[in-house]
Image: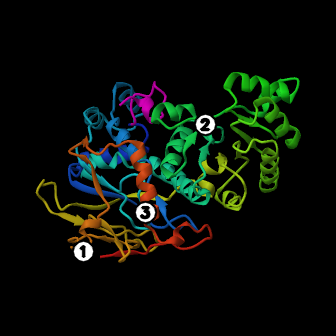
Amino acid sequence: MNPADLGLPVDVPSTALFTDHYELTMLQAALANGTADRRSVFEVFTRRLPEGRRYGVVAGVGRVLDAVENFRFDAAVLDFLRERRVVDERTLDWLSRYRFSGDIWGYPEGEVYFPGSPLLRVEGSFAECVLLETVILSILNHDSAIAAAASRMASAAGERPLIEMGARRTHELAAVAASRAAYVGGFTSTSDLAAGFRYGIPTVGTSAHAFTLLHDSERDAFTAQVASLGSGTTLLVDTYDVAEAVRTAVEVAGTGLGAVRIDSGDLLLVAHRVRAQLDELGATGTRIVVTSDLDEYAIASLAAAPVDAYGVGTQLVTGSGHPTCSMVYKLVARAASGDPKAPLVPVAKRASGGKTSVGGRKWAARRTDAEGVAEAEVVGTGPVPAALAPHQLLTELVKAGEVIAREPLEAARTRHIAARAALPLSATQLSRGEPVLPTEYA
């Protein structure tokens, strides 16, 4: 896998430094006292959903698999660690041979989740698992936040397509990951060419206000765009006077004009006026695309408007107010000793200050009612009840260090549509509420 496929600069040789300093100092201490090889189980979960959210969306699993494959300490990385005296020579020697050789199980990408859901289970030696904490959390927290916002927007939009256009509102590499997560969550295209190149997401775009302002008149700008891109293009009609622009657009492109875009003003009112004007001019098939700081609430408010597509930027790439999912990566079980055959012992934080966790290697299943509608997220550490066995959620992603479950991005997108549809109807309500499913521990 090429680092560029991760959204990384091509001169970054690995993902090994996408970690925190203390991952390596813990490794050094564990190597020194003989506990580094103890078989361990780490799990990724969140104790709560962002306030008011009714479900979460798993996104970034494919990127996690790529990151694990590329987690290598090459000569340049080792030299950096040596120069900074981050760890000793014994640890550097160990890192030079690092290859994850354990197993990873997880919720498949696009699935929904709830508080306590064991989204990812990483098993292997303590040493090889602890190093992956930060990069895994970095990917899952970001991508799942974007996908959850995208899912809410897709629910609000109904059958109308959504265009991701937030690249200029976030870090350039985060923008690529955001486009991918938005596609999983229900968006249909992106304006970001890097996302299209790396992940095969359809890309769209025509012109900005600058193109209109470049020309001596709006008519000249429209004429140039149609001459170059054809009458099926989308003309931006709110640089000056909207009504005059719509009239000019149809005169220039004809009644076969593909679409007009509205980027400011009272979108509900303007969309109705533009639709009426287009119909009067005979451009009944011309679509209306609206942009301008949309979020799920603004999209829902336009449900009755004659809008054909939405372009969303800032609110999407910032998670619509919730830019992270507060996921954590915790040790939940470890071997009783360094013996490879030693039994696993459940472990968990029990501090009185909160942030407690549930120990033990977990399974998860989603119980449904007679109609097939989900009614509970069931998490357990013992045998899986026979009735829940067919509804288990974790799938094997990595076996003995080899990725075995890589899939097309389209599969994750399709899975999310099905997973969301299987939730109670209240899941798609935009009003604040508790998680739509309770988490039960068996």
Instruction: Identify the coloring.
Output: rainbow
Task: Check residue 9 for magenta coloring.
Answer: yes
For the residues marked 1 and 2, what is the alpha-carbon distance in whole angstroms?
45 Å
Residue 316, image x and y in percent?
A: 61, 50
The residue wearing badge 1 is: 387
| Residue 191: numbered disc | 2
For the residues marked 1 and 3, what is the alpha-carbon distance in whole angstroms?
20 Å
Residue 206, by quadrant, is top right
Foreground residue among 373 and 317: 373
Q: Is residue 22 shown to the viewer in this render? A: no
Look at the numbered discs 1 and 2 and tell me whether their residues touch, using CB distance below 8 Å: no
Foreground residue among 225 and 292: 225
The residue wearing badge 3 is: 113
Describe residue 269's horizontal placement relative to residue 433 as left or right: right
Judge whether 98 appears above or below 358 on screen: above
Mark 2: give few (<14), some (14-19) or many (20+) Cα within 10 Å.
many
> The magenta stretch spans which residues?
1-15
Q: Is residue 301 shown to the viewer in this render? A: yes
Quadrant housing the N terminus: top left
Residue 357, by quadrant, is bottom left
